[in-house]
Image (spheres, rainbow, N blue to C red):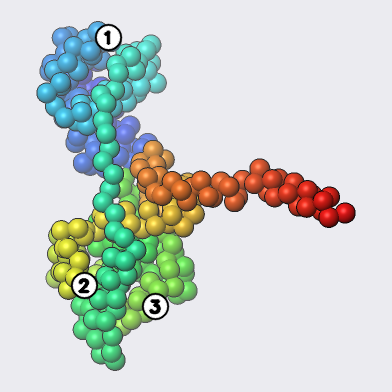
Amino acid sequence: MSDGALIDRFLEMMAAERGASLNTLAAYRRDLEQAAELVRGPLGDADAAALRKLMANYQSLAASSAARKLSALRQFFAFLLDEGERSDNPALDIARPATRRPLPRILTHGDVERLFEQAGEEAEGEAPPAGAVRMLLLLELLYGSGLRASELVSLPRRAVAGEREYLIVRGKGDKERLVPLSDRAREAFGRWLPLLADGSPWLFPSGKAHISRVRLFQMLRALAGRAGIDPTAISPHVLRHAFATHLLEGGADLRALQLMLGHADIATTEIYTHVDSRRLVELVNRRHPLARMAAGAATVDVAASSS
């Protein structure tokens, strides 16, 4: 079978079984078709030596780009192995290019409080501007629920109903997940819904569709400027990072955070474990069974000495 046909079958599997997005599928196709052009002979028949020569062609690329191309190859050959087209996965013998994942920029608790104070002041009064109420709700959902910008702006009007304490969000790969909805966010929803124009299916409409991610970015930076915060330090993604980091600082479980953020791989969530290591040490000292055993032994010693 030709490389083109094998690549098509692989991408069909990725779409059907793993819910890969159109952007992900397009990237895999580019990487695999490029590899098929560079390797000698059919890509589907390539051995580890041929793949090493192929990866040598990527030395001028950033390590992250080369790592992505190797990941595409590993998954492609894993598919061929599962389908019985091969008896091995030669890409597993190729060392992954070393990459350093940058830590996300983080807002301090003080910065977040200033943002909310500014948004709250602008949305005060008996008849506040609709835009101010909308901005307050957007902020509550970015920092209070950790939504991606694309997930937030495309929320349907029916995203919140009754007394439900969570949102059903459609995220990457068209996968749905439950996202917690704070009391503050529900209150902001209650103020925003009466201001929504009838007929729009979107929670944050704009023209015939919903507000764009670019517009959300602009509104958030403008709010930061009015709050006396450097606008260049603020973005929807930075607030999502702040949501995750501050939850971990408060003792949240990494697995729970993975579910809330919609990460397919726990390794993606582990980037947030850069939070204060002293807090983690204190957590072990206070919560670990050995800590309770030590406390119990101390109690016994005190009782023995007083008898």
Comparing 301 with 83, the one in front is 301
Residue position for label 1: 47
Horizontal side of residue 298 vs 115, given as left or right: right
User: For the point 60% across and 50% down, which residue is it?
Assistant: 287
Comparing 185 with 108, the one in front is 108
Q: First in sequence: mark 2 or mark 3?
A: 3
What secondary structure is marked by label 1? loop
User: For the point 20% across and 28% down, which residue is it?
Assistant: 63
Q: Amino acid at mark 1?
A: Asp
**Disc marking residue 211:** none
Comparing 114 with 33, the one in front is 114
Is residue 8 at all visible to an observer of this figure? no
Please tell me whether residue 111 is drawn above or below residue 260 in the rendered image: below
The quarter of the picture where the C terminus appears is: bottom right
Neighbours of disc 3 within 10 Å: few (<14), some (14-19), many (20+): few
Residue position for label 3: 187
Q: First in sequence: mark 1 or mark 2?
A: 1
Coordinates of residue 125 in the picture (x, y in percent): 28, 89
Coordinates of residue 279 in the picture (x, y in percent): 47, 51
What is the spatial separation of the Cα atoms under label 1 and label 2, in whole angstroms?
58 Å
Residue position for label 2: 227
Q: How many marks?
A: 3
